[in-house]
């Protein structure tokens, strides 16, 4: 358990090799022929060392292709994910949806749609890949794993509790044998936390609360936030609010 906590804090573990798909060892190097994770690599700089496109010739770039997402799919919020590219394929997401698109032609290879039960559809920041597996979060508090070859679902596991006003939108991070998920409950001042899941089975390895409860807002601000959240859920057709104890997912700490 302590070793996993250190891995999450330091983002530094010994990485195993895979036969095909994304080699996890590439996440520790500056991206060149791929963009294998949300920030490109573990440095978090979102920086590419490539030099072919530079300040002198960037104005000569022209449009190669367009892939259009329908407004009803994006809930009017547009595409907020950072695409991940592995082996010439772009993988990206919006709430409840994930795609694989050929990076050279824009041809769709597959599209996956999650059967949502509601939640905050403010956006989705992207996917994570390890080997031949893709991972992304859903607004109703699940981590979903897909096969990158055809988009078929491998498993889905809860990472937070929608009834406790949590939602999930961040891009997961793969560190060795851990898929790191982050969730938020900021609409009602629930503490955000990160959790680690087994990439093979989806079983939770641990959960760590990130924010101290001492930073809570005034009671009247909290009450107003809860009223706003109730209205938003009603608009989404998920008006099933109820008071519950703290999620059992957090009691695994």
Image (tube, rainbow, N blue to C red):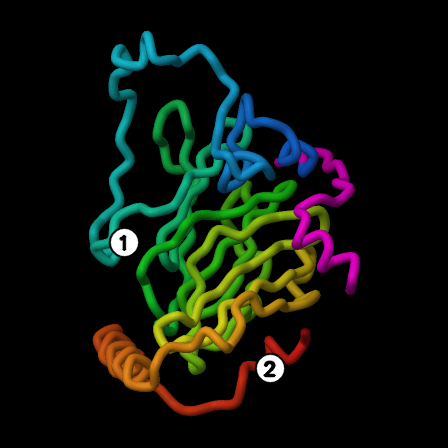
Residue extent of the magenta highlight:
1-23
CA neighbours of label 2 inside 10 A, class few (<14), some (14 to 19), many (20+)? few
Is 157 above or below relative to 104? below
Which quadrant does the N terminus fall into?
Answer: bottom right
14 magenta-colored:
yes
Judge left or right: residue 19 versus residue 249. right
Residue 74, numbered circle = 1
Mark drawn on residue 248: 2
Whole-percent x, y for residue 232 in the image: 25, 74
Query: Between residues 64 and 43, which one lies in front from this camera angle?
Result: 43
Q: Is 11 left, or right, of 145 in this rendering?
A: right
Query: Which residue is at 25% across, 21% downward?
Result: 63
Q: What element carries label 1?
A: helix
Above or below 197: residue 146: above
Q: Which residue is pictured at 51% across the width and 44% down the height?
A: 150
Q: Do the residues labelled 1 and 2 touch (CB within 8 Å)?
A: no
């Amino acid at each position: 358990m302590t070793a996993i906590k250190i891995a999450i804090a330091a983002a530094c573990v010994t990485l195993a090799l895979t036969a095909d798909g994304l080699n996890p060892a590439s996440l520790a190097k500056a991206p060149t022929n791929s963009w294998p994770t949300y920030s490109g690599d573990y440095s978090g700089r979102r920086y590419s060392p490539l030099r072919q496109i530079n300040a002198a010739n960037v104005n000569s770039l022209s449009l190669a292709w367009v892939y259009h997402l329908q407004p009803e799919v994006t809930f009017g919020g547009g595409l907020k994910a950072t695409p991940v590219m592995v082996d010439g394929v772009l993988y990206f997401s919006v709430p409840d949806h994930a795609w694989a698109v050929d990076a050279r032609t824009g041809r769709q290879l597959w599209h996956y749609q999650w059967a949502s039960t509601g939640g905050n559809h403010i956006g989705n920041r992207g996917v994570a890949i390890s080997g031949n597996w893709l991972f992304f979060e859903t607004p109703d508090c699940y981590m979903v794993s897909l096969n990158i070859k055809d988009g078929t679902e491998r498993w889905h596991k809860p990472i937070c509790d929608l009834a406790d006003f949590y939602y999930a939108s961040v891009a997961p991070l793969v560190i060795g044998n851990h898929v790191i998920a982050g969730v938020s409950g900021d609409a009602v001042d629930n503490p955000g936390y990160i959790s680690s899941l087994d990439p093979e089975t989806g079983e939770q390895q641990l959960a760590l609360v990130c924010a101290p409860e001492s930073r809570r807002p005034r009671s009247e601000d909290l009450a107003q936030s809860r009223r706003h959240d109730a209205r938003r859920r009603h608009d989404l057709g998920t008006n099933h609010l109820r008071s519950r104890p703290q999620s059992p997912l957090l009691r695994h700490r």
